[in-house]
Amino acid sequence: QFGLLIGTYRFVRDQERNASIRYWLASLFSNALGLAIYTICLIYSDNIARPVFGFTISNSLFYFSGLTQTLFCLSLLGAISKKTKIISYLSLLVFITAFELLRQKFGFEARVLFMIFCGAIYYGLQIIILRKLCIQFDSTQLRFLRGITYFEFGFDIGRLPIVILASHD
């Protein structure tokens, strides 16, 4: 993830004024940082059943990554309104609060179900936006991104039966 971020940044640094690029880089950076924090928390956690606050931080970064990836897709359609930006960033605060409550009061399954639900929302929105863009523009890159987003959506939803089956053991 960090290698992709560094490679991408080198490629796009001349386009810093482009809002789409900023969303793309924010998504890559927050996902890479979230993975690093998640890994560190796993390594140093004494009791995985009662995870540390670092898991809230890492999952919030994963949420932010999905959010900024969705804003990236939306920015390809045109300028993003101030209202949409405010609502998007407020949703991050709601996410952090909700995830922290889940971390403190509920088990692993509840947190995973919450992440699946959030992922389904932003992957679904990305697919809708990318479908519109693919109709407007004949672009191999957009079709590729749409295909990858379908896979991500499938992987996200694919976790659902695994969590449900694992919780009934």
Image: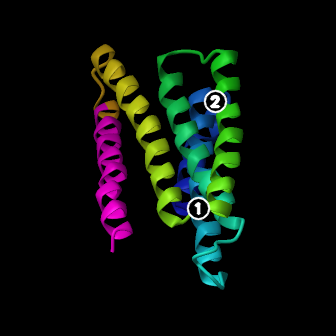
Q: Is residue 42 above or below residue 115?
A: below
State the residue position of label 1.
106
- What is the C-alpha distance between the residues marked 1 and 2? 26 Å
Query: Dot 1, how many residues are within 10 Å of its Cα: few (below 14), some (14-19), or many (20+)?
Result: some
Residue 80 drawn at (x, y percent): 60, 18
Q: Residue at x 33, y 74 (%)?
A: 169
- Secondary structure that dominates the magenta span: helix
- 39 vs 141, nearest the viewer: 39
Give the foreground label among 1 and 2: 1
Residues shaded magenta: 143-169
- 141 vs 34, nearest the viewer: 34
Q: Is residue 10 visible?
A: no
Q: Is residue 106 magenta-colored?
A: no
- 157 vs 113, nearest the viewer: 113
- Residue 169 is labelled as none
Work out whether mark 1 precedes mark 2 in sequence or the reverse, and give the earlier one. 2
Query: Dot 2, how many residues are within 10 Å of its Cα: few (below 14), some (14-19), or many (20+)?
Result: some
Q: Is residue 1 above or below residue 135?
A: below
Residue 156 drawn at (x, y percent): 37, 51
